Amino acid sequence: MIARWATVALLAMAMAACGHETNKDYAAMNKMPMHTVCVGRMLVELPKGGQMDWQQQFDHATVDRLPLSINTSSMFWTFVDKRKTELEQPTKARPQGTLGIYKKVGDNAVIMQFRDAEIADLQGYYTERYLWLGSWGYKYKTGGVYDNQAAELLAQVENTIKQVEPIDNFQPPQGLGFCIDGALVTGKIGPIWSGVSSSIKGWKRVSVNVGASEDDGTRIKFSWEKVSHPLPMPTPFDDLEMFKSWAGESKRSSDDDRVVSFEVLRKENRQLMGMPGEEIAIKAELANGQEWYRFEWNSLDDATRPLKSGFSFGLEAGDKDYTPDYVPPPPQEDLLALWDVMLASLKPRPSAR
């Protein structure tokens, strides 16, 4: 019995000597300046001063903000007119041009439907929508649909393009809605996703990202759509197995950037704001001295959550492939401190629902 307890004590001492502290409050160690950002119906703290890149998808389209250089209504309509002129130009396959439908919606939006410019006998239309919100604008891009489907699409998006209001993502907006880049999407819109990635001021080759999604179940099914059963998305635990496989294969190679060490820093079920989720954190060291970190947290599907909502976090630092201008990542403790303070900051936006 004495020998058994001595062994346990030695193991505990060894873990302490290796810096394995499961109860360490990393969030309290964070020194990175943070600011609050509205993403979806949530508020989250992200590093201040980094370059932010947004993406969003909703209303049957990929939606992007127009360049910031387009900052007046007249510049917006000049941009739109230039696009209209481009689509009216004859091509070898389309001597009459590709533009089929040009329809203004109110005084700040337009919808264009056009054919493929290269293949004459390819039927169907692509759809682009342009929206102006007073100081900036958006482009909605929808893939091709057949002729008989284009009119149905046009009728729906003509109504929903007005469900967008301008906001400042750094000033939590009031009222119902889902935050995207510079705007609040209101009303019933169906499936929607918005995500933002950010570089970190003072840290090279480190980025963080967050994403929000929901489905209010109100998406209008078009007459041509079939019932689909999408495959489940990989979870962080699934990704961990993939990274383990990658590291194992890399270790067996003779490349200069092969993996020589792969460590799982975290693998656990972790709830945030009542949302069940999975968290992983990994570190890989390469033969050429490079290091690579990857952290993930994703909420898991839960039918009891309103609007089938979800949220995700990510952090990546260093490089897992040979990089001539490689810069070592910040200390591991600093990365974990930033990670934990981000996760701990997640909270619902008041009046979002």
Image (tube, grey):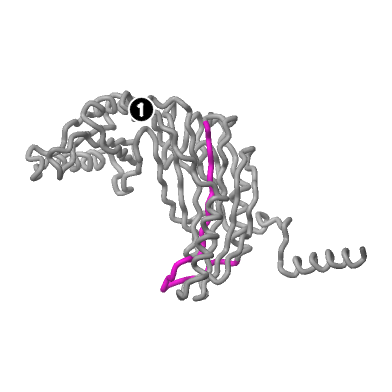
**Residue at horizontal 40 percent and vertical 28 percent from the top:** 227
**Residue at horizontal 47 percent and vertical 64 percent from the top:** 205
Above or below, 196 against 124 in this view is below
Give x and y (percent) for residue 184. Answer: 44, 34
For disc 1, the marked residue is 160
Above or below, 4 against 306 in this view is below
Q: Is residue 48 left or right of residue 165?
A: right
Magenta segment: 308-331
Give x and y (percent) for residue 114. Answer: 19, 36
Other-residue count near label 1 (Cα within 10 Å), few / some / many at <14 / 14–19 / ≥20: some
Q: Can residue 106 be seen in this view?
A: no
172 or 307: nearer the eye?
A: 307
Q: Quadrant of residue 123?
A: top left
Give x and y (percent) for residue 223. Answer: 32, 23
Let me know if residue 326 is in the magenta part. yes
Q: Can residue 309 be seen in this view?
A: yes
Let me know if residue 213 is in the magenta part. no
Above or below, 328 against 73 in this view is below
Q: In this view, does 89 lie to the left or right of 109?
A: left
Circle count: 1
Q: Is residue 338 left or right of residue 63?
A: right
Above or below, 145 against 291 in this view is above
- In the picture, the quarter occupied by the N terminus is bottom right
216 or 351: nearer the eye?
A: 216
Q: What residue type is labelled 1?
A: Thr
Q: Is residue 108 left or right of residue 192?
A: left
Give x and y (percent) for residue 252. Answer: 51, 70
Judging from the image, what secondary structure is the residue with disc 1 in? helix
119 or 337: nearer the eye?
A: 119
> Outermost residue, right direction?
2
